[in-house]
Image: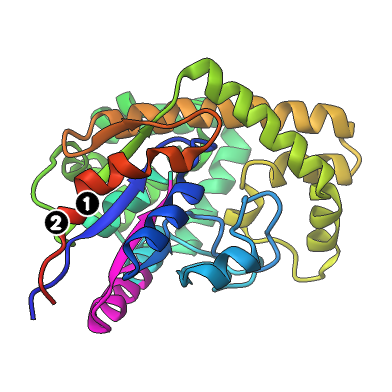
Amino acid sequence: MTSPRHLALVGPTASGKSALALAVAEAVGDAEIVSVDSMQVYRGMDVGTAKPSPAERARVPHHLVDVIDPWEEWNVVRFRDAVRDAVADIEGRGRRAILVGGTGLYVRAVVDPLEFPGEDRALRATIEAEADEHGLAALYETLVAVDPLAASRIDPLNRRRLVRALEVVRLTGRPFSSFGPGLTEYGEPVVPVEIVGLRVDADELAARIARRLQVMRAAGLADEVRRLLADTRGLSRTARQAIGYKEIAEFVEGRTSEGEAFETAEVRTRSFARRQRKWFERDPRIRWIDASPENPADALPAVLEVWSPCRASI
């Protein structure tokens, strides 16, 4: 049996990937959707992650949605393994996978042979304490001394990345930057996949993001966050950093107003979308198509032109 060639739909948030994926899956008839989203894995985080609805999941099987609880930690290695297992299962049933998501590192982790260093929570806690005591500037200078290349790639104010870089250096004895060269290399994917990117005009994308936040506000995102925070088990570090949830949590906890929280979430989402676009634009394997402002499914013929001929005999 020859493995089928799968499809990955990538692009910035609010570009219409999920709607297009549904249209593609229904058009080809032998595909299942695999979410490559770092937050849709969490049960109960529905409104703020733009998670596919139960009705949409009933139309086409979805994988990697609602697989862990919001107080659990999640990371790229766990995600990679879970997605590859899902793809193998789909292949084993003679079907194809449509990978859908805008989390660039997660997409690369699934389709490419990237190397990821381990983790040490105790060591990370020690470095976090150093950051609290001495400040981020001192932490950054420490990184400059031991791994100047990594320091040149990290925002000096990005606490999470600084702590992680130093954790890896101390844990492995290797520069954090030595684990990065794979991200600049784009060879044949280890998972057979065609990658299609959705391109959206920047002004149109900003308008879509604003509308999406309005919809989330009307749909009760603040109430959803209240329910999550009311659970004595709380939110994991990764879940709490999700765009929208972090800002609305600050409102629920009384540190800002609801309007300010949603404004901040919109600004942060636009910034995230710019980073997503830049990340994907570096990958020469991606075939770009224009996403319709009114109906993302209008791009269906362009996707099928790329993907349908690639179906292998299975």
Where 307 falls versus 141 (above or below)? below
Residue 60 seen in render: yes
Instruction: Where is residue 216? Give x, y as percent.
Output: 75, 43
Q: Residue at x 20, y 45 (%)?
A: 306
Number of numbered discs visible in the structure rendering: 2
Q: Magenta includes 87?
A: yes
Determine whether, in the image, residue 227 is placed left or right of residue 15: right
- Identified by mark 1, the residue type is Trp
Q: Circle 1 is placed at which residue position? A: 307
Q: Circle 2 is placed at which residue position? A: 310
Q: CA distance from mark 1 to mark 2?
A: 5 Å
Q: Quadrant of the C terminus?
A: bottom left
Mark 2: secondary structure: helix
Determine whether, in the image, residue 300 is placed left or right of residue 249: left
Q: Magenta includes 99?
A: yes
Determine whether, in the image, residue 213 is placed left or right of residue 199: right
The reply to whether callout 1 and callout 2 are in contact (CB within 8 Å) is: yes
Q: Nearer the viewer, residue 184 or 16?
A: 16
- Identified by mark 2, the residue type is Cys
Where 71 falls versus 251 (above or below)? below
Residue 246 placement: quadrant: top right
